[in-house]
Amino acid sequence: MQKILALIMMLAAMLAVGCGDTSVYDANGHVHLRMAQASAADGAIGKTMEAFAQDVKEKSNGRIEISVFHNGQLGSERDNIEACELGNLDIAVVNQSVLANFIPEIAAFDLPYTIQNEGHADRVFLGPIGQDFLKRLDKVQLHGLGIWESGFRNLTNSKRAVEGIGDVAGLRIRMMEDKIHQELWKSLGADPVPMSWGDAYTGLQQGALDGQENPATVIDKNNVVEVNKNMAITQHVYSTVFIIMAPKTWESLTPEDQALITSCMAEANIAERALSREMDKAAIDTLESKGMKVTRPDKKEFIADTQAVRDMFGASYKETLDRIAQAAEGL
């Protein structure tokens, strides 16, 4: 019976009007896709990727299988974006900061303290603004599937506990190769050092860097506590990852399979956020138990001192920033 159903599905795929090239289906009507990210498998994103793949497999009765790759096994985030554009990779999970090289307006989300809290983040990324940015990916030969949470970024360092702005001055902080992030730390008196994450731990270990900034879960999973003993809950930027798909793959799927994947992704969008927040809180407790001194400086001081950064870049993203601000009303 299962074989007959598979053949029926394959026939439907071949006859579907406007569904595009059906070469992704094998002779039994099955599809095998690849999904990749550059981060660890045991974070909220990695776990949700595995759960999403399993959900798709179960709901398609085993017809659609997704192999998941972590830790940059298939290349860097930029490599994976370009592979999706070319149709050489089916699905990629990429940080908003990297994707901003392809859709410049996404950089608005990297401005410090643009997202106020988790409720605000949900309104922005699960609502019309998030959907709009997913549609914009069509312009660069990408299909947007969803937006997941990496979380609020916090500062760690090996020199001193950060109780206020003055404690940040002079710290050599590793950051992504991103102009906004560099200006953010300059405005706080730090010495920003753009560097790939793969090289950061060695830099911290050897003393070439004093600190770094990331969500708490990333800090915990990458053993930063071994080289940094101070963490300040600054929550200076809210980071997301976009789940993108190769248009070549998407257009080759039947409308029914497109709907199935879309439905599974909608559920994953909610589940990943819940898991991310649970893991983030647990990570802070874990880091403290491992000897990390955690401080909670007054964010008002940080918000005030980074206003110049928002002013510097704000004009370029005014429409998006206005929409983000409106989404915070009533919170």
Image (cartoon, grey):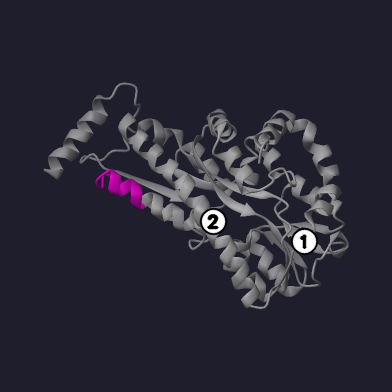
User: Picture quarter containing residue 226?
Assistant: bottom right
Q: Check the picture and name the quadrant holding the C terminus.
A: top right
Name the foreground residue: 188 vs 201: 188
Residue 282 appears in view: yes
Q: Provide the residue designation for mark 2.
A: 276
Q: State the residue lying farthest toward the left.
A: 1
Amino acid carrying mark 1 in the image: Ile
Residue 222 appears in view: no
Using residue 164 as the reference point, say whether residue 80 is left or right of it: left
Using residue 102 as the reference point, say whether residue 68 is left or right of it: left
Q: Residues within 10 Å of mark 1 (few under 14, many from 20)?
A: many
Q: Nearer the viewer, mark 1 or mark 2?
A: 2
Using residue 234 as the reference point, say whether residue 71 is left or right of it: left
Say whether disc 1 or disc 2 marks the residue closer to the N-terminus.
1
Using residue 160 as the reference point, say whether residue 103 is left or right of it: left
Determine whether 247 is above or below 75 in the image.
Answer: above
Q: Secondary structure at mark 1?
A: strand
Residue pictured at 65% horizontal, 38% vertical: 106
Q: Residues within 10 Å of mark 2 (few under 14, many from 20)?
A: many
Determine whether 60 is above or below 252 in the image.
Answer: below
Residue 84, x across and y down, in percent: 49, 40
Determine whether 309 is above or below 256 in the image.
Answer: below
Identify the mark at residue 100; answer none if there is no mark.
none
Cβ atoms under marks 1 and 2 closer than 8 Å: no
Residue 76, x across and y down, in percent: 57, 52
Residue pictured at 45% horizontal, 33% vertical: 247
Amino acid carrying mark 2 in the image: Ser
Q: Real-space Cα distance between discs 1 and 2?
A: 24 Å
Identify the mark at residue 173; answer none if there is no mark.
1
Is 243 included in the stretch rendered in magenta? no
Over which residues does the magenta segment extend? 54-66
